[in-house]
Image (cartoon, helix red, strand yellow):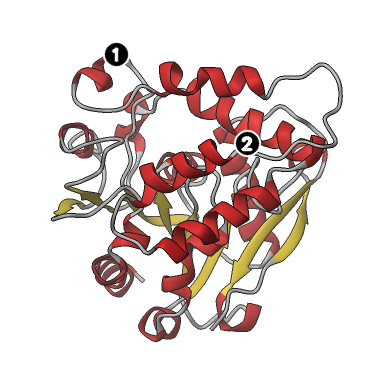
């Protein structure tokens, strides 16, 4: 089934219009558990197309994908926001839709967003499934262990997207679209998929509002705060998947960080051989199995 794009109003930051998609034709079924998905940098709820197409997943649970601040259809009056704001916004979306508890899946940046959700509302988030991520800031320690250096790589782009005057003719450049595709999907997806995301980025990040959204999304990425000192406060189960070919966060840091969830009722880390950074897209079958394992055990 095709993803149905919707928006909903929540009060955080003076009133956010949050972009989201809900399975089952956009209808919430209170008899089922709910799995929330938070997408990666500069993608949209369409990142979870394969999950929404899975009858095994949609029969087992409601699937709710939410677009972070700076992404997709999500917008707000303020140009200033952080990942904590996205976590608060997502919790308000869940509440407004009448959903009591959720399992939360986060791809890349979505991983540290869903952990923030669990820290802010432990009574609502009953399980975490981080995919291809890290719980640290973009620190020197993480870089020494094979993680990327976004500040050095991406600051020139950030400077390009800062303007004291409106930019009505702005359209995100092809180089950036290519970076999102190559870093996230690697060589594991088709040319059609890469073109799809190229078109999505060109549509979302255009005009003055698009430039400002893109600028702040990148600022959040470059200067984000780490969560290592807070991981001990997570009590729900944590199932973490990492690809062996993840060029952004590698294999060392996930092994260290999963061990820091010392209060969690269960932790698990699995590496997917040949898996890329956006695992739900490059390895949907394995991700589906992992989600269903947690949902069936803890629903």
Q: Quadrant of residue 12?
A: top right
- Residue density around tag 1, few if under 14, some if 14–19, many if 20 or more, within 10 Å: few
Q: Earlier in the sequence, mark 2 or mark 1?
A: 2
Q: Quadrant of the C terminus?
A: bottom left
- Residue sitting nearer the eye, 174 or 161: 174
At which x and y percent is residue 129? 33, 54
Figure disc tally? 2
What element does badge 2 sit on? Answer: helix
Q: Nearer the viewer, mark 2 or mark 1?
A: 1
Tell me the number on the disc at residue 31: none
163 vs 166, left or right, is left
At which x and y percent is residue 269? 17, 50
Q: Is residue 79 above or below residue 279?
A: above
- Residue sitting nearer the eye, 122 or 151: 151
At which x and y percent is residue 285? 27, 72
- Residue sitting nearer the eye, 3 or 64: 3
The residue that appears at 29% across and 75% down in the rendered structure is: 296
125 vs 87, left or right, is left
The residue that appears at 54% across and 51% down in the rendered structure is: 43
- Residue density around tag 2, few if under 14, some if 14–19, many if 20 or more, within 10 Å: some
At which x and y percent is residue 140? 29, 13
Q: Is residue 212 above or below residue 164?
A: below
The residue that appears at 81% across and 44% down in the rendered structure is: 15
Residue annotated with mark 2? 85
Residue annotated with mark 1? 140
Q: Quadrant of residue 99?
A: bottom right
What element does badge 1 sit on? Answer: helix
User: How far apart are the alpha carbons under marks 2 and 1?
Assistant: 25 Å
């Amino acid at each position: 089934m095709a993803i149905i794009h919707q928006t909903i109003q929540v009060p955080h930051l003076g009133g956010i219009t949050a972009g989201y998609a809900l399975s089952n034709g956009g209808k919430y079924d209170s008899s089922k558990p709910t799995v929330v998905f938070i997408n990666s940098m500069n993608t949209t709820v369409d990142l979870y197309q394969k999950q929404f197409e899975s009858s095994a997943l949609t029969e087992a649970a409601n699937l709710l994908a939410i677009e972070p601040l700076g992404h997709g259809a999500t917008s707000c009056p303020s140009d200033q926001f952080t990942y904590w704001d996205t976590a608060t916004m997502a919790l308000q979306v869940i509440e407004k839709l009448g959903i009591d508890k959720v399992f939360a899946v986060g791809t890349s940046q979505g991983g540290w967003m869903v952990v923030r959700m669990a820290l802010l509302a432990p009574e609502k988030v009953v399980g975490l499934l981080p995919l291809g991520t890290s719980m640290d800031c973009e620190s020197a320690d993480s870089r020494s262990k094979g993680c990327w250096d976004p500040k050095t790589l991406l600051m020139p782009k950030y400077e390009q997207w800062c303007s004291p005057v409106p930019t009505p003719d702005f359209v995100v450049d092809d180089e950036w679209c290519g970076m999102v595709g190559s870093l996230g999907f690697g060589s594991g997806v088709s040319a059609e998929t890469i073109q799809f995301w190229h078109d999505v980025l060109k549509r979302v990040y255009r005009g003055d509002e698009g430039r400002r959204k893109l600028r702040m999304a990148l600022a959040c990425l470059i200067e984000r705060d780490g969560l290592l000192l807070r991981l001990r406060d997570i009590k729900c189960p944590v199932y973490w998947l990492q690809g062996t070919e993840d060029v952004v966060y590698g294999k060392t840091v996930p092994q260290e960080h999963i061990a820091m969830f010392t209060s969690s009722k269960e932790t698990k880390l699995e590496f997917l051989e040949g898996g890329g950074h956006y695992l739900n897209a490059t390895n949907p079958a394995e991700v589906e199995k992992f989600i269903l394992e947690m949902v069936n055990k803890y629903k």
